[in-house]
Image: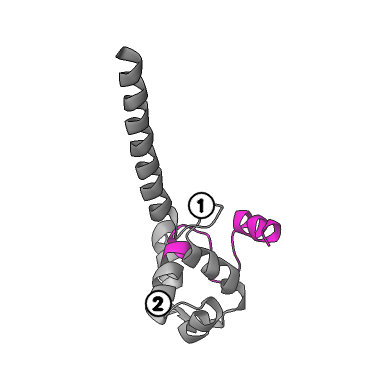
Amino acid sequence: MGRDWLILMGQHVGAAVRAMMSRIDRLLAPFNRDGVPDAVSRILRAWPEVSTSWRPNGTAPRNLEKRWRWIWEHLLIDYGQLSVLTGLDRKEAAEQLQLCASLRLVYPDGSVSSLVSEQLEESP
């Protein structure tokens, strides 16, 4: 009886693990193979092509964190173009760009971080 019980428990645990892995797979579906959400990946690829212009107003703050936000606040971004280049709706494109900017993955001058640049060069 002990061996049969172990086999039965093993099957039950195996089914539970498969169900858990299936759930994890569903949760990870929006991410690409590098663990980056697809929408973020689209933003990173498109950002260097997006039209922008900078219209500063006032004096840049001395605090670097505040200065970073100030620069982005005065950057005019063609969200329509970003939306077309990424295939995302304007709201999602803007939200994803804000995320990328806050993580310093994209820069106001239209460039991307060196780490992002390396990853984009390596991926197809």
x and y percent of residue 68 in the render? 45, 64
Q: Residue 42's image quarter? A: bottom right
Assign the N terminus to one quadrant of the image: top left
Which of 12 and 124 lies nearest the eye of the viewer?
12
The image shows residue 16, relative to residue 100, as above or below, that is above
The residue lying toward the viewer, choosing from 115 and 41, is 41
> Which residue position holds label 1?
35
**Label 1: element kind:** loop
Residue occupying image coordinates x 38% and y 34%? 14
Q: In the rendered view, tell whether residue 122 sits above or below residue 80.
A: above
- For badge 1, the amino acid type reads Gly
* Side of 23 relative to 114 (left or right): left
Residue 6 in the image: above or below residue 123: above
Question: Under tag 2, what secondary structure?
Answer: loop
What is the total number of numbered labels drawn onto the structure image? 2
Residue 4 vertical placement versus 106 (above, below): above
Viewport quadrant of the C terminus: bottom right
* Label placed on residue 58: 2
> Cα distance, mark 2 to mark 1?
39 Å
Looking at the image, which residue sits at the far top?
A: 2
The first of marks 2 and 1 along the sequence is 1
Query: Is residue 11 magenta-colored?
Result: no
Task: From the viewer's side, name the closer residue of 57 and 32.
Answer: 32
Residue at 37% in and 78% down: 91
Task: Report whether 36 appears left or right of 22.
Answer: right
